[in-house]
């Protein structure tokens, strides 16, 4: 019997409230389930994620499905364990906060099969409200704001298919991913951007229009700002250890806190730059606060990360 065509790897840690819907979306894919392997890699959950994952995987007749335990517990280590155990020639990353459309896995696999010059493929991230509050709608609006999020292709509605620097999630040829050394475990964030840069020696990073993945943001401003502060620290660390430099679009974020000080300009950015969801006055106010906070937290993180002493020996990456 032939092995699976695609391995889907889901890295998790304390995702019991979100993982079920994520796995349901994977189960709803329009590929035969006997051609799909699903590996949920847990990094030490204490909230019931593991039994929930086992029960969900048991409900579907995939080629193979398993819950793996990773002692290290960080996201990159979880992904690398999934890569190590993957049996299929194509690996698709799916996060617990994501809800992939029904044709996502098939279209990613077909593109990699048909275009040998493409090394990575992914689609658009669309933030959706995590709840019914005005704050939830406002945070989603902020994260869907093309200007406030630095004009990255995978956040812009209507972006055409084409070569880019990074994509959301990502689908890969398993052999190339292993040859590149997988995800760097010394990068707590920005590990996907770094991986895509290293995979460029195998081919292009490709954004595929029409592949829109829903994303559930953090449910509190504190969690959101902490996330983007960590992104800033991690981005500065990545620039320092890789020798790479900020993209022109990322410089937009560096100036965003200053723009946020001008209320009229900030309002114009919020109203014109967001791609939904619609909301009332409170949602718009929440989006303004979230936009300014995200940009300020990211900038503060970059500043702190730039001042931190560089690690003596960055983690080696297999060639």
Image: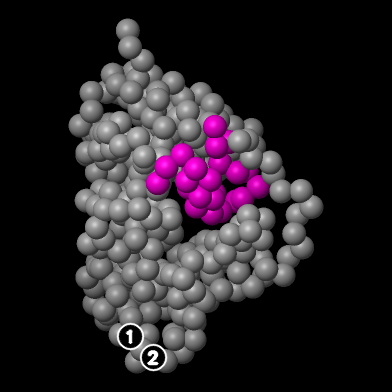
In the foreground, 209 or 295: 209
> Marks 2/1: CA distance?
6 Å
Determine the residue located farthest toward the right in the rendered image. 312
| Residue 98 seen in the figure | no
Residue 257 on image: x %, y %: 49, 82
In the foreground, 47 or 93: 93
Q: How many circles with numbers are drawn on the protein?
A: 2
Q: Secondary structure at mark 2?
A: helix
| Residue stretch in magenta | 179-204
**Neighbour tally class for label 1: few under 14, some 14-19, many 20 plus, Cα within 10 Å:** some
The image quadrant where one finds the C terminus is top right
- 93 over 62 or under it: above or below: below
Say whether residue 182 is magenta. yes
- 62 over 266 or under it: above or below: above
- 213 over 273 or under it: above or below: above
User: Which residue is disc 2 drawn over?
Assistant: 263
Residue 288 on image: x %, y %: 38, 79
Q: Quadrant of residue 74?
A: top right
- Contact between marks 2 and 1 (CB within 8 A): the answer is yes
Residue 269 on image: x %, y %: 33, 81
User: For the point 24% across and 68% down, which residue is it?
Assistant: 276
In the foreground, 215 or 57: 215
User: For the point 66% across and 66% down, which residue is it?
Assistant: 305
- 33 over 19 or under it: above or below: above
**Neighbour tally class for label 2: few under 14, some 14-19, many 20 plus, Cα within 10 Å:** few
Q: Secondary structure at mark 1?
A: helix
């Amino acid at each position: 019997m032939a092995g699976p065509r695609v391995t889907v790897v889901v890295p998790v840690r304390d995702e019991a409230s979100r993982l079920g819907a994520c796995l349901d979306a994977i189960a709803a894919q329009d590929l035969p389930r006997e051609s799909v392997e699903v590996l949920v890699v847990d990094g030490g959950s204490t909230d019931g994620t593991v039994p929930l994952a086992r029960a969900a995987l048991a409900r579907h007749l995939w080629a193979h499905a398993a819950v793996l335990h990773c002692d290290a517990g960080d996201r990159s280590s979880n992904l690398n364990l999934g890569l190590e155990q993957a049996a299929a020639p194509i690996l698709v990353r799916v996060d617990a906060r994501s809800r992939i459309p029904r044709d996502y896995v098939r279209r990613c696999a077909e593109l990699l099969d048909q275009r040998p010059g493409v090394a990575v493929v992914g689609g658009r991230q669309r933030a959706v409200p995590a709840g019914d509050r005005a704050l939830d709608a406002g945070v989603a609006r902020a994260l869907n704001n093309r200007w406030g999020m630095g004009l990255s292709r995978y956040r812009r509605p209507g972006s055409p298919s084409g070569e880019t620097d990074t994509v959301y999630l990502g689908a890969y040829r398993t052999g190339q991913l292993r040859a590149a050394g997988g995800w760097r475990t010394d990068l707590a964030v920005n590990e996907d951007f770094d991986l895509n840069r290293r995979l460029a020696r195998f081919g292009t990073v490709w954004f595929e229009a029409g592949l829109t993945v829903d994303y559930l943001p953090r449910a509190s401003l504190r969690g959101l700002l902490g996330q983007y502060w960590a992104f800033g620290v991690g981005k500065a660390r990545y620039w320092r250890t890789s020798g790479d430099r900020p993209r022109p679009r990322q410089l937009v974020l560096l100036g965003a806190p200053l723009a946020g000080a001008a209320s009229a300009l900030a309002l114009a950015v919020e109203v014109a730059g967001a791609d939904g969801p619609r909301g009332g006055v409170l949602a718009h106010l929440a989006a303004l606060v979230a936009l300014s906070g995200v940009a300020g937290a990211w900038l503060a993180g970059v500043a702190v990360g730039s001042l931190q002493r560089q690690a003596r020996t960055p983690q080696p990456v297999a060639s």
